[in-house]
Amino acid sequence: MPHKIGAKGNIKIVVAALAGLLAVGCASTPDFKKPEPPVFPPPPAEPRFIFEASLRSSSNIQDPTFAEKLREIATGDTVTPSGLSKPYGVVAHKGNVFITDTQQRAIVLFDLNKKMVKLFGNEGPGSLLKPLGIDISKEEEVFVADITAKRIVVFDLQGNYLRSIGDANIFSRPVSVAADPTSDKIYVVDTGGLDSDSHHVLVFNRKTGKHIETIGKRGRAANEFNIPLQASITNDGTLYVVDSGNFRVQRINKSGEFTGSFGGIGRQSGQFSRPKGVATDREGNVYVVDTAFGNVQVFNPTGELLLFMGDRATSGGPGRYSLPAGIDVDENGKIYIVDQFFRKVDIIRPIDAKPFDVFLSQ
């Protein structure tokens, strides 16, 4: 007959387990050389960027508390970290990384300043159905494109719902939103679908929600789109739109006029196979995610290829991607790359930029 263990027995087991942990911590460990993080471009070229960290869950930036450790020892129950399920879009601002998650139907906020992770947009009037594109305005409002609800939902930086823009009467499939830092406009990419002619960019006043104009139509000529997916806008108000079905990126000025494009179908550098995400930096350089290549190609404002970052892979190590989607570049030049399959956001920083002093283990 098995022996029963009472309360005193449980306490002894916990104490013994803690003593064992201390003994293990004090024991000598074998030497382990941490692999060097990848740099871009790789040697022998002079590196310009270096991998910093990956965001997956709260365990990347939060140590479990003593109570949580004790509970795990006593009961075997582990603390489930909050994090990413199926990320898509990303925007980073002053140490806050906002990520749309289509499976959780929410925004996942990694606050690297306060070392915390929170979800918002998953309840109340700002509830999201399938959030995709995301951006932050100069007034520090968060704009989210909800493809299923057919609207743009606006939050403050703490995740409080403010208002919404548009509805099913004007949107077909809104997939991306870009806030103009030079005006009160937002640009919303409506991808329409295979049987729709609504392949265009809609312009709104971001404060009043008034529809101002529509840029483009379905087609292959200049200023026409075929399944546009994401957009980004530079500090001077130049808009770049990923025109995925035409395998190019189109450039549009503040007046809504087409001023050029770059790319083309192919498997060579500077060409695209399945372009999806786009971001711009302070110098006006353009970062384009190609899901089929599993990398990011970087172009100057005129469309000249500068370098590429990342490799397609079956395991999600640093700088390795299977289904990359959204991308952003923050005010310090750090790059944030979403991979849906590996459920992560890689942070890649300029080689001379200061890293975040927050990450626990990679």
Image (cartoon, helix red, strand yellow):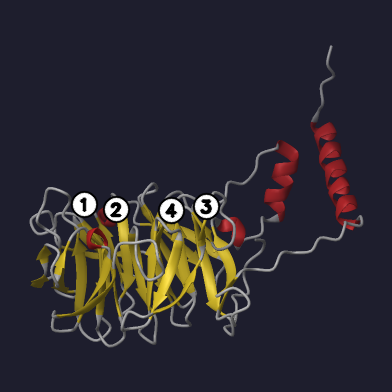
Spot occupied by residue 221 in the image (x, y as percentages of width and height): 13, 68
The mark found on residue 323 in the picture is 4
Q: Which residue is mark 2?
A: 128
Tell me, yes or no, whether the two marked residues, 1 and 2, touch with CB atoms within 8 Å. yes
Relative to 39, is 300 above or below? below
Q: Earlier in the sequence, mark 4 or mark 3?
A: 3
Direction from residue 47 to residue 10 in the image, left or right = right
Q: Earlier in the sequence, mark 3 or mark 1?
A: 3
Amino acid type, callout 1: Ala
Direction from residue 183 to residue 88 in the image, left or right = right
Tell me, yes or no, whether the two marked residues, 3 and 1, touch with CB atoms within 8 Å. no
Q: For the residues carrying marks 4 and 1, which lies nearer the camera in this image?
A: 4
Q: Secondary structure at mark 2?
A: loop
Q: Which residue is mark 1?
A: 149
Relative to 291, is 96 above or below? below
Q: Earlier in the sequence, mark 4 or mark 1?
A: 1
Disc 1 to disc 2, how far (Cα)?
A: 7 Å
Image quadrant occupied by the C terminus: bottom right
Q: Secondary structure at mark 1?
A: loop
Q: For the residues carrying marks 4 and 2, which lies nearer the camera in this image?
A: 4
Q: Secondary structure at mark 4?
A: loop
Name the residue rendered at 9%, 56% in the picture.
197
Q: Earlier in the sequence, mark 4 or mark 2?
A: 2
Q: Earlier in the sequence, mark 3 or mark 2?
A: 3
Rendered image quadrant of residue 137: bottom left
Q: Which residue is mark 3?
A: 82
Disc 3 to disc 1, how far (Cα)?
A: 25 Å
Q: Nearer the viewer, residue 158 or 94?
A: 94
